[in-house]
Image (spheres, rainbow, N blue to C red):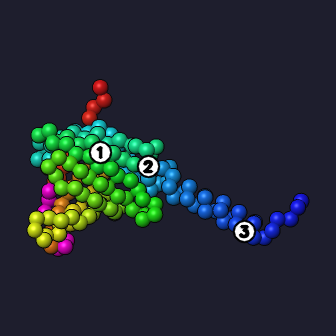
Amino acid sequence: MPSMPLKTLVVGILMLGGSAVAAQTSSPQSSEFRQFDFWLGDWDVFDAQGNPGGKSRIESIADGHGILENWTDSNGTTGKSLNTYNPEKRCWQQFWVGDGTPVLELSGGIVDGNMVLTGTRQGKGDIKVTDRIAWTPNADGSVRQRWQSSVDGGKTWKDDFDGIYRRRPAH
């Protein structure tokens, strides 16, 4: 067998190792990309009192690399969020845009079995608003979504939305 220069061999091994690591961290099959799968589906959404709040279709996109939320509330207001696990930052990220609601850029991950994403945005005047949204998978297959905001850097929180997602029956 002809001998290979040591430099060529080392570079080849490093390239193979780097490719394997990149494939592992960006594969939609890795466990991080599956952490938010409990939210996938067609949902009827209810407020904390059990009143209809809207409908949401949460779907896997980009060959499992992202999750797209398609929201319509009971008044017809719509919105969408794009969600993905970012392997370079080692966190989940969400970008929300909605009709009549603030734009949100959130990041975070699993905390005590809940997906918890937070972000800061500009409120009225010079007020910075911190948003925190938690999604909790329930034993009955429903998902609780609780959106809270703080204007004092997280010392106190107010509920902006507290709802239950219930799977829409298949037709």
Location of residue 117 (image quadrant):
bottom left
What residue is shown at x 13% (from left), y 71% (from top)? 126
Task: State which quarter of the image contains the N terminus.
Answer: bottom right
**Chain part drawn in magenta:** 153-160
Look at the numbered disc 2 and give the secondary structure of its residue: loop
Instruction: Please identify the residue farthest to the right as the structure is shown.
Output: 1
Q: Give left or right: position of 6 versus 2.
A: left
Separation of residues labelled 2 and 3 (CA atoms): 32 Å
Q: Which mark is residue 69?
A: 1
Q: Measuring from the top left, give residue 26's x and y in whole percent.
A: 50, 55
Report whether residue 103 is seen.
yes
Q: Measuring from the top left, give residue 133's x and y in whole percent.
A: 24, 58
* Dot 2 and dot 1 residues touching (CB under 8 Å): no
**Mark 3 belongs to which amino acid?**
Val
Q: Classify mark 2: residues with Cα within 10 Å, few (<14), some (14-19) or many (20+).
A: some
Q: Which mark is residue 65?
A: 2
Query: Which tag, 3 or 1, sits closer to the chain's start?
Result: 3
